């Protein structure tokens, strides 16, 4: 249960930044409104002025069913006059009892998690060295109608940039008939009077815990994936958005997308639906799938950047992303303008389309990111997307690639197009240089194929690069997955009845259903190499590189 992302400490604050940060004793006002957890049968009153954001799939896999954060970061004092910015938070976790097992194959009962295990798990990459030695204070919190919770409190020091910032973890566990629910709060821990105020506020919030009638459970239809039917997915995601107040589910005319959002701007949302549908039609026209793509794409649009950052546990500089594990596209509406959202949406929408086009496998970044930026630049005209030279605002790539050519920082073509994902992302010199180089290559290839590049720069064999790359990549992945399925089915047929019903049978059925998770790295690289040979192997790369450079500097 490790987090990939940093979470909250923002040291080295400027004075201007301090103007927008509250005192560490603020954000403790008792809540007035109950927050219901309809699928789990309880409710409580969160603190006032705290954001209530849905739980992403990474946290769901860790049994988190609710997450809350103070809407504004607070000023934390520590070690004399030192200051840091910190956002107190709450994670609500459901712990299910272990299923009973009998017979010779029964496992020993696992050791129950301690409060330190929870802190270790929920801290992610900020697990403090001081956790092991932290003292735990235990008490009982009385709630209504005979309920009570076990409260465990400990203070740890987060070591960041050489500074140790005290943070309190305040964890209350409530035992219900079917499961345990754990409320894990964290808040500033340096000043005694501040800790006392926070402790009192948390105790009052936990005292509002009540049992309510369970509505329809989230997993009422059993396991749900993007391969489930539209009707099953629709019902599942309706139940899911109902868990967080303010969120809604929007269907699209094509029934190829389901949109989850807490935005109330219906005009912008209408524009999102129109562009999503136009993007999908464009992708299917330019990259026809070998067989219809039946998976439903999930798009989440947060009303604010703060909601976006809390949901994805992302930092600054991220405008949207597609998560191949959850298969969800996540965006937000920047304040004052949705224009950037539209470009980023089409860019990430292309990643989502390719995820299903290539049977949940990845292409080289020059292809994937280059096309994302190429289509992100297109504009809506009526119900269609039409070509445009570059993206607007701070997303424009042409100035960057021209600067790179002038300063000699462009990576050699033969290296750039063969980079693996980490190599591509880190090519430099800036964090957008890789995007600019891939965008300009794709722009050259796509516009040339459309007949919009002068003959002095263009060779007819260039028009075969992208089609040959796609076909070879697709054929390679589909063939590899067919082999994995065939081997799994043969092994399954060889099992006796008891084995087929046991763990070995489950493992082989998992290979049949999700062969892409069993493709070895060497096999993937072989498919990539075959695709490159079938496409770039047809052209003189040195000549292409020179003509591409001249086109960028003179025509873009």
Image (cartoon, rainbow, N blue to C red):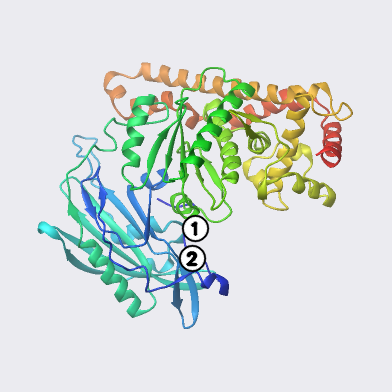
Q: SS of the residue at dot 1?
A: loop
Image height check: is 120 above or below 511?
below
Q: Is residue 199 left or right of residue 293?
A: left
Toward the right, the furthest residue is: 456
Taking depth in this image into account, of 496 and 165 the one nearest to the observer is: 165
Q: Is residue 296 left or right of residue 102?
A: right
Toward the left, the furthest residue is: 146
Q: Is residue 7 left or right of residue 438?
A: left
Give x and y (percent) for residue 118.
33, 57
Taking depth in this image into account, of 58 and 526 the one nearest to the observer is: 58
Q: SS of the residue at dot 2?
A: loop
Q: Which residue is mark 1?
A: 6
Callout 1: 10 Å neighbours few (<14), some, many (20+)? few
Residue sitting at x 65%, y 40%: 420
Q: Which residue is mark 2?
A: 9
Question: Marks 1 and 2: CB-CB under 8 Å?
Answer: yes
User: How far is the residue under mark 1 from the one under mark 2?
Assistant: 8 Å
Give x and y (percent) for residue 517.
48, 32
Image height check: is 70 above or below 294?
below
Taking depth in this image into account, of 71 and 82 the one nearest to the observer is: 71
Give x and y (percent) for residue 385.
63, 30
Q: Is residue 162 visible?
A: no
Callout 2: 10 Å neighbours few (<14), some, many (20+)? some
Residue sitting at x 42%, y 30%: 226
């Amino acid at each position: 249960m490790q987090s990939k992302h940093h979470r909250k400490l923002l040291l080295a604050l400027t004075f201007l930044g301090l103007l927008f940060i509250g005192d560490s004793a603020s954000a403790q006002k008792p809540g007035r409104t109950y927050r219901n957890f309809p699928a789990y049968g309880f409710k409580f009153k969160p603190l006032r002025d705290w954001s209530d954001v849905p739980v992403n799939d990474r946290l769901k896999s860790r049994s988190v069913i609710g997450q809350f954060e103070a809407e504004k970061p607070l000023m934390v004092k520590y070690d004399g006059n030192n200051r840091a910015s910190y956002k107190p938070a709450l994670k609500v976790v459901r712990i299910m009892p272990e299923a009973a097992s009998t017979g010779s194959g029964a496992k020993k009962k696992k050791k129950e998690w301690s409060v330190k295990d929870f802190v270790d798990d929920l801290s992610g990459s900020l697990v403090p060295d001081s956790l092991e030695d932290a003292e735990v204070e235990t008490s009982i919190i009385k709630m209504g109608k005979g309920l009570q919770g076990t409260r465990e409190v400990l203070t740890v020091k987060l070591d960041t940039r050489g500074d140790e910032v005290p943070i309190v973890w305040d964890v209350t566990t409530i035992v219900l008939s079917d499961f345990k629910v754990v409320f894990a709060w964290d808040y500033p821990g340096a000043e005694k009077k501040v800790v006392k105020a926070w402790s009192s506020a948390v105790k009052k919030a936990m005292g509002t815990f009540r049992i309510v009638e369970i509505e329809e459970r989230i997993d009422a239809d059993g396991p749900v994936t993007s391969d489930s039917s539209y009707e099953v997915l629709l019902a599942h995601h309706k139940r899911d958005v109902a868990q967080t107040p303010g969120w809604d589910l929007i269907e699209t005319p094509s029934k190829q997308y389901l949109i989850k959002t807490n935005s109330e701007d219906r005009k912008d949302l209408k524009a999102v639906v129109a562009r999503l549908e136009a993007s999908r039609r464009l992708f299917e026209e330019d990259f026809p799938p070998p067989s219809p793509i039946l998976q439903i794409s999930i798009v989440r649009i947060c009303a604010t950047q703060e909601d976006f950052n809390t949901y994805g546990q992302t930092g600054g500089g991220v405008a949207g992303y597609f998560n191949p594990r959850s298969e969800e596209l996540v965006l937000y509406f920047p304040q004052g303008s949705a224009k950037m959202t539209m470009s980023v949406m089409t860019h990430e929408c292309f990643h989502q389309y390719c995820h299903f086009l290539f049977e949940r496998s990845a292409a080289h970044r020059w292809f994937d990111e280059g096309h994302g930026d190429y289509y992100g630049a297109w504009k809506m005209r009526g119900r269609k997307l039409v070509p445009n030279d570059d993206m607007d605002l701070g997303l424009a790539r042409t100035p960057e690639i021209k600067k790179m050519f002038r300063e000699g920082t462009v990576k050699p073509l033969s290296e750039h197009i063969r980079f693996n994902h980490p190599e591509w992302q880190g090519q430099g010199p800036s964090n957008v240089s890789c995007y600019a180089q891939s965008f300009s290559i794709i722009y050259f290839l796509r516009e040339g194929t459309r007949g919009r590049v002068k003959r002095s720069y263009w060779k007819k064999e260039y028009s075969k690069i992208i089609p040959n790359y796609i076909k070879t990549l697709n054929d390679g992945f589909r063939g590899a997955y067919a082999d994995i399925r065939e081997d799994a089915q043969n092994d399954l047929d060889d099992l006796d009845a008891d084995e087929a019903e046991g763990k070995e049978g489950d493992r082989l059925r998992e290979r049949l259903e999700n062969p892409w998770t069993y493709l070895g790295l060497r096999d993937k690289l072989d498919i990539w190499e075959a695709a490159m040979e079938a496409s770039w192997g047809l052209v003189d790369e040195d000549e292409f590189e020179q003509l591409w450079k001249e086109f960028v500097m003179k025509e873009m």
